[in-house]
Amino acid sequence: MKGFLIVDKPQGITSFDVVAQARRALNVRKIGHLGTLDPLATGVLVLAIGEGTKLIEYLMGADKEYEATLEFGKISDTYDSEGKITKTDAPVPTSDEIEAALPQFRGEIQQIPPAFSALKINGQRAYDLARRGEKVELKPRTVYIHDLTLVAPDQLHIHCSSGTYIRSIIHDLGQTLGCGAIMTALRRTHVGQFMLNKAIDITKTSPENLISLEEIVSSWPPVKVNKDEMIALQQGQKVHIGTSSSGAPLQPPHTDTIFAVFYNDTLVSLAELNSGFLTPVKNFMVK
């Protein structure tokens, strides 16, 4: 069994709970994901099943989109409603004041992740250190915010690069406005090509809902090979294939292009193209 599953993660459970449920439902041990969601968050959680895990590294860096609900006038050690909350005396900002503060959070920004995060410090999770009351110092990281829009007085739409912490955006916005702010709800609507309208309830997990590997790589530059070429690639050998199926010279669009290699419309390999030779990077089991 192989493919991808788009799950609409419910609130109150961890992403690893979802993975465990999928393992039981599909009777498959090998399952990966394209980024976890906190228990508070809901929405798109993409699971890679079986040999689908071989594609994770090519999909993990995809942009993400969120709908975030926040509350002004409070601060939290976790930057959300599940932490230790302190109220502030500052007035709640108006929509115009919020709008005026948003531009500084768009584009390329430096962001410090929350102390209560899964990032590792000397081999230990930051949230483990924070829970023990130890000092957590995380370095700023560069992220890119493509869109940050106030869609309601207490709701933001965010389109951002992978690795962005929405809790940090909300916390930093509250600090900028001088009143504090915490995240009270978060819904992920997109992870790259995976959309919420294609997501299933975790209770409906079944092989019929799997997205094939062929569909996942349908936008990648393709190469079709014959049986002998497929066997050679599966054995780790280079294959000369200097022209496309139409007879035109085969050229990679970019130097780092990975080609999806098909035999009889089945994905059999991922390969690099150099001087007319395909070099296998990853192979997939073929019956």
Image (cartoon, helix red, strand yellow):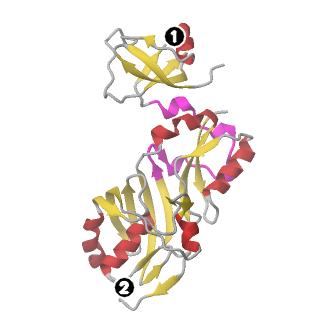
In the figure, residue 98 lies in which quadrant? bottom left
Q: Secondary structure at mark 2?
A: loop
Residue 78 drawn in magenta: no
Q: Nearer the viewer, residue 93 or 174?
A: 174
The amino acid type of the residue labelled 2 equals: Val
Crowding at label 2, few (<14), some or many (≥20) Cα neighbours within 10 Å?
some
Q: Position of residue 115 (x, y in %)?
A: 48, 69
Q: Position of residue 205 (x, y in %)?
A: 68, 46
> Which residue occupies 48% across, 48% down?
195
The amino acid type of the residue labelled 1 equals: Glu
Q: Where are the magenta residues, as a range?
A: 190-218
Q: Secondary structure at mark 1?
A: helix
* Residue with the most extreme bottom position: 89
Residue 166 sits above or below residue 81 on the image: above
Residue 261 sits above or below residue 179 on the image: above
Crowding at label 1, few (<14), some or many (≥20) Cα neighbours within 10 Å?
some
Question: Mark 2 — residue?
Answer: 92
Does 28 sit left or right of 226 as displayed?
right
Q: Quadrant of the N terminus?
A: top right
Query: Which of the two discs, 2 and 1, labels the residue nearer the N terminus?
Result: 2
In the figure, residue 256 lies in which quadrant? top left
Q: Label 2 to label 1, Cα distance in Å?
A: 66 Å
Specify whether residue 94 is in view.
no
Does 7 sit left or right of 74 as displayed?
right
Q: Position of residue 116 (x, y in %)?
A: 52, 68
Question: Mark 1 — residue?
Answer: 229
Tags 2 and 1 in contact by the CB under 8 Å rule? no
> Which residue occupies 47% across, 41% down?
59
Specify whether residue 182 is in view.
yes
Q: Position of residue 179 (x, y in %)?
A: 36, 84
Q: Quadrant of the C terminus?
A: top right
